[in-house]
Image (cartoon, helix red, strand yellow):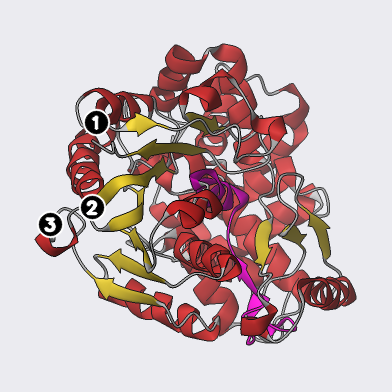
Amino acid sequence: MMDGNVNLRMLVMEMLLTENAYSHMIVRDVLNKHNYLTQQEKSFVKRLYEGTLERQIELDYVINNFSKVKTHKMKKVICVIMRMGVYQILYMDAVPDAAACNEAVKLAQKKGFATLKGFVNGVLRNIARNKDTIAYTSMSVKYSMPEWIVDMWTAQLGQEKTELILKGLLKERPVTLRFRDVPELTGVDIDSAVNAVQEAIACRGGKMERHPYLSYAYKVTGTDDITRLPYYENGAFVVQDASSMLAVTAIGIEKVARSAEAPLRVIDLCAAPGGKSMLAADMLEKCDVDYAVLSRDISENKIALMQQNFDRCGLKHTTAAAVDACLKDEGLVGTADIVIADVPCSGLGVIGRKRDIKYNITLEAAEDIIELQRKILQVAASYVKPGGRLLFSTCTINSDENEKNFMWLKNEIKMTPVSLDGALPECLHTDTTKEGYLQLLPGIHDTDGFFISVFEASEA
């Protein structure tokens, strides 16, 4: 598969060799740079890059079973070429095994390793001949997940749930759009926007279907450039995972708005990329109350991008500012009706979208981050006025970062958990939602892995 000027496999190889960059940003930047590629070519690049990265542990295991030279001793370029070849052999049915082998040999030659073409060809063809007999020794290898994560989840959730999560993380993760039901800001009613976008996506060979949990959320597959869809510039929709939408929904903003004195204040402490701030603002627009949403994050670059989105969406009462969430602003203590604290975390719940996380995070780093989380949560709790609400959420699956922090807020900070049953869809109600929290799990729920909890500050 070739574009006139770009060998697609060469492009993927260079992406996989890129260091010190996030995988989802590499995909975005490369596809934007090579926007002249056809949709089919873009899909091939994205699939081969993400799949090779995602399945790296399994691919190395397979290579090491057929090669005398193990992957950790190979030249990095050759190791990447081998991984790409094995991924195509095992998972890309549209690519003949012979083509996967031949193209790997060509890549090796182009990168100056002609002397190794026999090695590359021999190992890959042997794997292709025996691919149906490969036996996997553990869930770590089978699902390409570091052993410490598998062990942690098995200890916390049991083997059955852990395997469902591992399977779920390897499934295709569609983009989720939230359509905004605020025609006074977007200039278009929500049904018209949905129909126009759905038709445009279908014309490009993609698919859009409603999410089972929320009426305004839609899952999109088969299209790459969301910014070129109808009504994007109007702010009629934003990209936001359903788990993030559910977190804001759980707050019960309408109930808070009915009982709070105007103007109502929302503080979003770790706001980037801004989805929760925007949904909170849209909900308050529909409540027809005076309000202000203060969106904060430590990154100046992220703040600029958030403000661009706020402006595109017509949110005049939502402002972004670069502030360290650990530093308490004494002028805000006891002033917020709602505080959103989606705190930094190990990110294990979004591995399905950000595939490099599992290779970069360590058990020690996951343990160290808890201290940072509690610093932020203590500041967040101080901003909540009596009777106000605090949303504590993460995008991870780890009881030490989630349930233990929930109990710390309840017992040490003396915040009162709020039952989530009245705010969340009935299909998500569990014993824990009555207690005030919900752990969403990929493979079990139709979302990323996400922890959601809501607390109320004492009136006393």
Provide the residue designation for mark 3.
327
Q: Is residue 357 left or right of residue 180?
A: left
Image location of residue 96, percent across then percent down: 82, 52
**Location of mark 2 (residue):** 383
Sequence order check, earlier mark of 2 and 1: 1
Q: Is residue 389 above or below residue 274?
A: above
Viewport quadrant of the C terminus: top left
Residue 77, percent across and down?
44, 57
Residue shown at 57%/65% (left/top)?
A: 287
The answer to which of marks 2 and 3 sits earlier in the sequence is 3
Report which residue position mark 1 lands on. 367
Q: Given this view, does label 1 or label 3 mark the residue nearer the observer?
A: 3
Q: Nearer the viewer, mark 2 or mark 1?
A: 2
Q: Nearer the viewer, residue 198 or 168?
A: 198
Mark 1: secondary structure? helix
At label 1, which amino acid type do we have? Glu
Q: Which stretch is magenta?
A: 226-251
> Label 1 to label 3, Cα distance in Å?
21 Å
| Crowdedness near tag 2: few (<14), some (14–19) or many (≥20) residues, C-alpha within 10 Å | many
Coordinates of residue 193 in the picture (x, y in percent): 78, 76
Residue 316's disc is: none
158 up-or-down from 266: above or below:
above
The amino acid type of the residue labelled 2 equals: Tyr
| Badge 2 element | helix
Kindly indicate the quadrant of the structure image that contains residue 50: bottom right
Query: Quick one: 161 or 217, which is closer to the camera?
Result: 217
Q: Quadrant of the N terminus?
A: bottom right
Is residue 271 visible in the rendered image? The answer is yes
Horizontal side of residue 417 vs 300, given as left or right: right
Tell me which label, 1 or 3, sits earlier in the chain.
3
Q: As displayed, is residue 401 above or below residue 281?
A: above
Q: Is residue 140 visible?
A: no
